[in-house]
Image (tube, coloured by chain):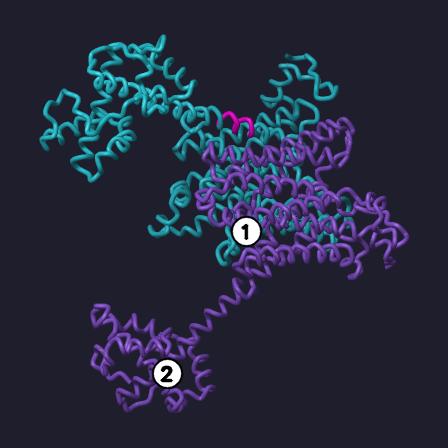
Amino acid sequence: MNFSIHDFISLDLPAILTALFAALSCSLLGNFLLLRRLSLMGDAISHSVLPGIVVAFLVTGSRLTFPVFIGAAISGILSVFFVELVYKLGRLDTGAAMGVVFSIFFAGGVLLIEQAAARSVDLDADCLLHGQLETIFWYPPNNWSNFLRLDTLSLLPSELTTSAFVFIAAVIFVGAFYKELTLSAFDPGLASALGFHASFLHMGTMVFLAAAVVASFEAVGSILVIAMIICPPACARMYTDRLATQILLSLVFASMSVIGGYFLGAFGPILVGFSHSLNGAGMMAALSGIFLGGSALFAPAYGVLPRAVRRLRLRLFMLEEDVVALLFRWEESENLSDLTVQEISKKLDSTSLLSVALHRLVARREILTNPMKLTESGKTRARSLVRSHRLWESYLVSEGGVAPGRVHDKAEQLEHFTQSELTEKLAQSGHHPTRDPHGRIIP
Amino acid sequence: MGGDELQSIRDVSVVLPSVSEVLNVLTFQAGFNSSLVIVGTTLLGIAAGVIGTFALLRKRALMGDALAHSALPGLAATYLLAEALGFEGKQIVPLLIGAAVSGILGVVSIHCLGKYTRLQEEAAIGAVLSSFFGVGVVLLSAVQYVGSSGGLGHFIYGQTAAMQQFDAVLLACVALVVCAAALLLFKEFSLVCFDPDYAKVGGWPVGAIDLLLMALVTVVTVIGLQAVGMILIVALLIVPPAAARFWTESLPRMIALSMTFGGLSGYFGSAASSLLPRLPAGSIIVLTAGGIFVVSFLFAPERGVLASFRSQLLLRMKIITDHFLRDFYETTERCGTLLSNVIPLKDLSSFQRLSITRRIMLAWWISMAGLGKIRDGKVSLSSRGMENARRLTRSHRLWEEYLQSYTDLLPSHLDYSADFVEHSLSPAIIRNLEEKLAVGGRLDDLAEVPKSLHSIPLSNEEGK
């Protein structure tokens, strides 16, 4: 493996930076689309730019970036316009409207490509889908001090400068209208009522989205564009409820996907003994999907597993309380026989979790097995629980007007969430009752 | 047109086929291969049209999109696996199975992301679609270096013209299965499409029905992938049903129309592609479907754009005319010239308030409907116009009376509320109002126009 700094700066760095700027502008705007449930607009636009590109080729006869940019942007914005039109006037749902518009646009593009091929215009729809990161390179100066001179910078690949420019413009747009964008993302109705032009902001977002898509797809392909519009914001949403945090996190995820994806694609196969590199843009998209899958599973705030664990622990906690309360009542009613595990399991209608709960109670020295008895600390816990249960019952009967026969289930739920302060308030409001509605002593 | 030469965009001339050639192709006389392609694409269009209708109504139009994209890694992985095991990679059946498996995996991921996390379904579709496709692209770049040639490209763009007999038979089977399923499970599918909650409450296995629907979409998508390609099979699943939606409110008719549209697109699209050079069949099929969609979107009665513009325009004209006529009556009433049928326009505030275009439209409308004439700053009503004016004022005031006696609206608000309703008061409602008000003793004479309950503003003051 012959790796040199010069190769890296001329081949890898421009490609990474181009993809990075593209991904950052896409995910920056993607945050607002995600909240407005318009994420698939990126999908629609990135397929719809095809005819614009081909027409720009045919008209100018060149592969210059600027005319292609304009052509693609025009057809992207046209597609947004048509989607709105079909959605509003045709009364189809947005998904169907997007599907209709982008598939017709794309079909037109493929047809035009075929026509262009007859005129020996070399145009390949493949590179629009997959990107051509590999073709971006830069002849860097040999001398480090020449790096910042204007004439060397002007040799930077046009893909890089375009995507950097669009990123800066998108940042300025979002920065300038942050408050308005936030408001209209969460509540477009309120935004309009307060006098912000929600539709104007919407069109603005769409125009910038089209620009971001167009600036990106030539280098990184439309698939990476879609991935970067949707995946990093969706990832970030698993961690936070705050929009600003979400945006920052999404930018971090986008950068990680790009940089990680590039290295995995370029050097990963070589490290495992494969002789060729793999498609970088595809790897970035795949990586962003993996990040999303990982976040959906493991993110502390909204991940599936942490939420399941929290729910399980809560159930376990409540089961433990039910066990000590049951033992307390058993001893209170002066039953001569001792409770067996089977009887507890039957009374509490739980089998699988019960052994875990008993285990934990024993470990915390709150109960003794053989025979089942509460220890002193277990008794204290049980007493406060039964106290809050019975206080709730008397409160519900005296203040809530609930029939005495129906308060048990309600109190059974409430007892677990009642802190001692609340218990005292309950006791005060009932003038410190000594017996519950069923005639039992309140401990 | 036959034999004429057509100038194309840039001097690449195209020789149009003769009428007999066109007929040959359309009647399957132009050779086995082109007939095969036409039959195959027609069948695909029919199958996609039928199942796409249910998908569209279930608001899952883009599910086909997700399926088609997430089939790619399965295709490429199967190819790589086969080559690694020493088999020929390009075998259609294993490839299609691989595609179906990864497509289903994608749909399941979308379902899980949408159900168990806070993501909305659109975002889940987009995320899965792009990351699966990303994996597919990575695997495709590995395919280039393995085996004979990177021959999987046609799954993205389609390779209709190279359709084999086997493919056509496969398409026929799929079309048959889909149509049979739609027929047998029509009740279940339509229930789930229109009211899944009701279906659930009624004890229907909504999940299983949904799954079956998605399975059928998967089959059509995977089979269609290699016929017309990824994006274009999505189009066949969405565009014909969307076009059919404009023509009817009845589901059986919508299905029939959608399958007709799909079939026609397949038929004419592939015929055109075999007759003219450089027309890729997939695109032409989709563009034909797109043409049908545009026509439906614009010209369908009732739901079409022009039809709804027309009905909106008619309603607006009716409202303007009604206000104008009532204003006429009330003005003559106020000036004490109740029976005269000519008054100057400047007295009519409802006319003064209109824009120039609306004034012209109103004048035209009134003379067209035989209600009267507007000329030289004066309006003269015909006897029919006079009668209409009287009737409109009467129904307006009857409604006001009704609101006054049966609701708690303030008199000052009556006029405003009655304004909205008066245009849609049918004779039956008017009779009903008369009876109610006569019983309540609020109406002295059934034939007369009741007195207004509020002062009628002077036109010149209000007009400015």
Residue B98 seen from this side? no
Per the rendered image, the range of residues in magenta is B290-296
| Residue A21 rendering spot, x and y as whole percentages | 70, 49
| Disc 1 to disc 2, C-alpha distance | 45 Å
Q: Quadrant of residue B458?
A: top left
Question: What's the residue type where badge 2 is placed?
Answer: Val
| Residue in view at x 52 percent, y 43 percent | B217
Q: Is residue B313 above or below residue A104?
A: above
**What crowding class fits label 2: few (fewer than 14 Cα within 10 Å), some (14-19), or many (20 or more)?**
many
Residue position for label 1: B124
Q: Which chain is purple?
A: A
Question: What's the residue type where badge 1 is placed?
Answer: Ala
On screen, residue A62 versus residue A343, left or right, reads right
Query: Magenta stretch: residue A250 in it?
Result: no
Q: Is residue A251 above or below residue B305?
A: below
| Residue in view at x 45 percent, y 40 percent | B57
Residue A62 seen from this side? yes
Between B170 and A207, the one lying in front of the other is A207
Between B181 and A41, the one lying in front of the other is A41
| Residue in view at x 75 percent, y 43 percent | A159
Residue position for label 2: A324
On screen, residue B191 versus residue A197, left or right, reads left
Q: Which chain is cyan?
A: B
Q: Secondary structure at mark 1?
A: helix
Q: Secondary structure at mark 2?
A: helix
Chain ID of residue with mark 1:
B
| Residue A330 rendering spot, x and y as whole percentages | 30, 85
| Residue B424 rendering spot, x and y as whole percentages | 28, 27
Which image quadrant: the C terminus of chain A?
Answer: bottom left
Between A220 and A148, the one lying in front of the other is A148
| Dominant secondary structure, magenta | helix
